[in-house]
């Protein structure tokens, strides 16, 4: 049940009637006709811009269309009053029965209330995290992991068929560096004194890997040259790091559907196949790039390379795919990877990158556009930096990681639920301050606590009602007399609940799960406001002495709110609290 969709349909039906009556010309494009909450709640429950957007193509004054539309809508029993405002906006007030019907719908549908078929089963691949397998995930990866996971859940909730994917960057020189670093820990496990040269990974997390390697191969590699152990150790170290990364993600509640290895594209013909696909379209050529703008690097010289004509698909410059020495560039396996995703039959690809990958956006979008002949869109979402604070100071580095604060550091300090919610309290491309002290405060200023407390408060009321002998089972609440929900403060909560299906579709359409977090805070505020008003107005208290029917109706209302909170937290990957400590 989506009241906003239902009332928009009523507006469109009224416009059709106006066309039939000759009040409006036929065939007007109604795609931009909206029905949404007014900016000022005092103006009504909903507002439509129909007269404003149709006036110019109809050749009529907005006010004239608005007056005629108001007359048509006046006969709809769901609409209590229609007011023409300003140059031609229509403000609608709905009969209170609509809000009670929303409460009944939530109780009947549970956390499926608000689910949408907007996606129509379109297959979407969401790739996120995709960190180099050289160590534990850091706090920047945490934000990308939370955002990507919540976005995938949101798309699933809006009717898409979603695949969560992790791209293992195990094809570059950094994995050789990892292997050499593990080898040093392996020597250390044998009692050898070692130094970590610049560029290696000195974090304590490799100590266990080195010790495990000793158990596996004994002293067979001690003192041996790289050609003896490097290739095998690359695979061993990568697997160990991916086990660590999977465990880190699991601690955050993130589980991938698929892991794809960059290394799998080398020596298998897959890179060659993807580049040939571009060549077949006339988009691969041999050429020399213009020098980079600004100060030239000391080692820069014009060299003929194999180039992808990415400018033909919206990029600023063409991009090299093979170096003058015949080696593939870093871009080539990424092209192959996205070619693989295109051939798997997805309708939409979404990549979640850190802000430092902003320069990669245009070339990657150009590659997917070329490979799919423009049929498969690629959306790239950038996640901005996270600044960590504790005790009023920047949070210090993790000794275990050596150079950064890890995902596990954050989860161990505040828990997965708090971490996830806080990471979604800002739009993904806006910087985020994460203050460990504030996120654990029990106050309205802490959105995690505020939302969780609203859900826990409803659970507490239901327990007290049961102790008082009042039946608040699902069947009892479904049969409650919702006509007893009549106070403006109660109807205000029901109105906020009614916004949930609309909010879900907007968040899904814009790929912005932070909208869910904002909505939940507002919904929680309505729950707390209604609770607090009961201090001065006994008739608003959730538990009514000697009035089981009234109690059931009020609890049905707040239970509906808690169900929506639970559904929203589910999208964010946060467990609803049933009690607060």
Image: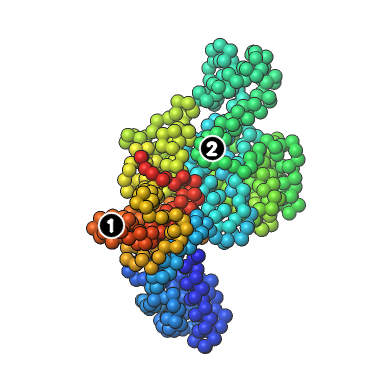
Disc 2: CA contacts within 10 A as few (<14), some (14-19) or many (>=20): few
- The residue under label 1 is 534
Q: Which mark is residue 250?
A: 2
**Mark 2 vs mark 1: which is more N-terminal?**
2
Relative to 144, does residue 56 appear above or below in the rendering?
Answer: below
In the rendered image, residue 9, in percent from the top left (x then y), is placed at 51, 73
Asked if residue 422 lies left or right of residue 325, the reply is: left
Counting every numbered tag in the picture gives 2
Q: Residue furthest top?
A: 191
Spatial distance from mark 2 to mark 1, Cα to Cα? Answer: 42 Å
Q: Secondary structure at mark 2?
A: helix
Q: Residue at x 53, y 17 (%)?
A: 195
Instruction: Return the x and y of residue 356 as percentages of the image width and height.
Output: 51, 42
Q: How is the image coloured?
A: rainbow
Q: Does residue 416 lie above or below 374 as drawn?
A: above
Tell me, yes or no, if residue 294 can be seen here: no
Q: Residue at x 45, y 79 (%)?
A: 76
Quadrant for the C terminus, please: top left
Residue 373 place in picture, x, y as percent: 69, 57
Residue 25 position, x and y percent, is 53, 84
Residue visible at 41% across and 37% down in the picture? 414
Identify the residue at image location x=39%, y=76%.
Answer: 80
Q: Compare residues 384 and 485 and report the one nearer the observer.
A: 485
Farthest-out residue, left:
536
């Amino acid at each position: 049940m989506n009241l906003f969709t239902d009332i928009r349909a009523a507006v469109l039906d009224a416009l059709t009637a106006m066309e039939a009556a000759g009040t409006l010309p036929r065939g007007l494009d109604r795609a931009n006709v909206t029905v949404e909450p007014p900016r000022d709640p005092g103006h009504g429950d909903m507002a439509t811009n129909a007269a404003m957007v149709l006036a110019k193509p109809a050749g009529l004054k907005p006010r004239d269309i608005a007056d005629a539309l108001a007359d048509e809508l006046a006969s709809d029993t769901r609409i209590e009053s229609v007011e023409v405002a300003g140059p031609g906006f229509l403000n609608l007030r709905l009969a209170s029965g609509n809000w009670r019907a929303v409460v009944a719908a939530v109780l009947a549908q549970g956390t499926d209330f608000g689910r949408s078929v907007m996606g129509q089963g379109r297959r979407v691949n969401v790739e996120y995290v995709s960190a180099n397998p050289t160590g534990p995930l850091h706090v920047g990866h945490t934000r990308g992991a939370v955002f990507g996971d919540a976005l995938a859940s949101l798309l699933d909730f809006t009717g898409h068929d979603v695949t969560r994917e992790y791209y293992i960057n195990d094809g570059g020189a950094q994995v050789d560096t990892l292997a050499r670093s593990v080898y040093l820990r392996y020597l250390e496990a044998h009692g050898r004194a070692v130094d970590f040269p610049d560029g290696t990974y000195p974090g304590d997390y490799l100590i266990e890997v080195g010790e495990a390697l000793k158990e596996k191969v004994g002293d067979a590699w001690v003192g041996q040259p790289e050609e003896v152990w490097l290739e095998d150790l690359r695979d061993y170290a990568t697997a160990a790091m991916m086990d660590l990364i999977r465990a880190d993600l699991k601690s955050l509640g993130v589980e991938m559907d698929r892991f794809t290895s960059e290394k799998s594209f080398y020596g298998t013909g897959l890179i060659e196949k993807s580049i040939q696909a571009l060549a077949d379209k006339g988009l691969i050529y041999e050429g020399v790039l213009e020098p980079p703008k600004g100060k030239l690097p000391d080692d820069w010289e014009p060299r003929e390379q194999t180039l992808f004509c990415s400018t033909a698909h919206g990029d600023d410059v063409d991009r090299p795919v093979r170096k003058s020495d015949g080696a593939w560039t870093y871009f080539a396996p990424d092209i192959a990877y996205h070619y693989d995703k295109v051939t798997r039959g997805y309708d939409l690809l979404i990549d979640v990158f850190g802000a430092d990958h902003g320069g990669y956006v245009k070339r990657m979008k150009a590659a997917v556009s070329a490979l799919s002949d423009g049929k498969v869109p690629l959306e790239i979402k950038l996640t901005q930096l996270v600044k960590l604070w504790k005790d009023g100071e920047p949070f210090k580095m993790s000794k275990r990681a050596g150079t950064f604060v890890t995902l596990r550091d954050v989860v161990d300090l505040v828990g997965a639920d708090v971490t996830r919610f806080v990471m979604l309290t800002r739009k993904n491309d806006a910087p985020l301050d994460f203050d460990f002290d504030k996120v654990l405060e029990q106050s309205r200023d802490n959105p995690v606590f505020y939302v969780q407390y609203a859900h826990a408060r409803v659970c507490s009321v239901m327990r007290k009602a049961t102790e008082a002998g009042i039946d608040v089972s699902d069947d009892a609440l479904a049969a409650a007399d919702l006509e007893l929900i009549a106070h403006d403060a109660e109807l205000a909560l029901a109105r906020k609940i009614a916004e949930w299906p609309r909010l879900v579709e907007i968040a899904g359409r814009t790929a912005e799960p932070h909208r869910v977090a904002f909505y939940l805070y507002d919904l929680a505020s309505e729950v707390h406001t209604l609770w607090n008003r009961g201090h001065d107005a006994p008739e608003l208290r959730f538990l009514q002495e000697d009035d089981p029917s009234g109690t059931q109706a009020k609890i049905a209302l707040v239970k509906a709110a808690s169900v929506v909170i639970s559904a929203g937290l589910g999208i964010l990957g946060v467990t609803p609290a049933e009690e607060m400590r």
